[in-house]
Amino acid sequence: MPEPVAPSAPSTPADPSRPTASTINDDQLDQLRAERDGWRESCTASVAQAEECWRELIAVRAELARVAVERDTWRQCARQAERELARLRSLRVTTPDPRAAEGITPDGMRAYLAERGWGRVTTGTVAESWWHGESRFGLHVPLHLTASDYAKRVLILAGDLAEIEDRGALGVLTDLRAASTTADSPQDGLTPAGDSQAAAQTETGPQRGAQRRCCENGPRA
């Protein structure tokens, strides 16, 4: 029995406008080759342009990463500055209540400063200037308890000491009040005024030298 034969696909008529190997001539072949070379050059240029864009993109990403690191660094610095500012603000008396200076006397402030290595460099009728070798500025000690700005001057002194000693101003006020209580108690037959006069008469040479430095740098008001 003969095997069935598969039907053949219908033949497609040849496109008369399409050149074939039998109909193409040398001029058309050269033209096709020129078109091929043109497309090849165009593709090569496109690939080179794409590679250049890719390299620029990588450079931009690297720059963005560097800027992000700098941004994070500046943010960290800003947060540290905010914390430091808050700390410094906490060291000073935020509410200048005159009652905070109650019980603090000039002799008490003198005793407090002298105990911590401060030296008196100038003596006036209204205030005294004190200087410390490790401090960048001097301090003013008010002398008149009845002065209208006495409490304000005491609070300024406490705030400056708090900043120098890196602690709270309220703690400084408490210690100044305790020093005032001790200094105002008569000892060895001398009154507080007698102690002050004796101290004024026994200024040493280093204190006079510190007085010259204080005058040159200017104590803090």
Image: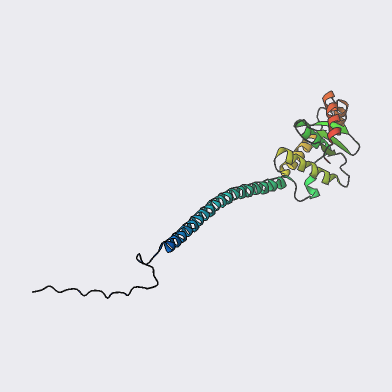
In screen coordinates, is 24 left or right of 45?
A: left
Residue lying at the far left of the rendered structure: 1
Q: Identify whether 30 is placed above or below 86.
A: below
Q: How is the image coloured?
A: rainbow
**Residue 3, relative to residue 121: is it above or below?**
below
Q: Residue at x 40, y 64 (%)?
A: 25
Quick one: quadrant of the C terminus?
top right
Towards the viewer: 190 or 59: 59
Is residue 191 visible from the viewing direction of this image? no
Q: Position of residue 79 (x, y in %)?
A: 64, 49
Q: Residue furthest right?
A: 125
Provide residue 165's location: percent of width, then percent of height: 72, 38
Residue 56 appearing in the image = yes
Specify whether 78 is left or right of 59: right
Residue found 41% across the figure and 61% down from its top:
26
Where residue 153 sits: x, y (%)?
83, 44
Count of all numbered marks drawn on residues in the image: 0
Q: Residue at x 74, y 46 (%)?
A: 92
- The quarter of the image holding the N terminus is bottom left
Measured as percent of width and height from the top left, residue 158 is found at 77, 42
Closer to us: 210 or 203: 210
Judging depth in this view, the residue of 3 and 122 nearest the camera is: 3
Q: Nearest the camera: 90 or 137? A: 137
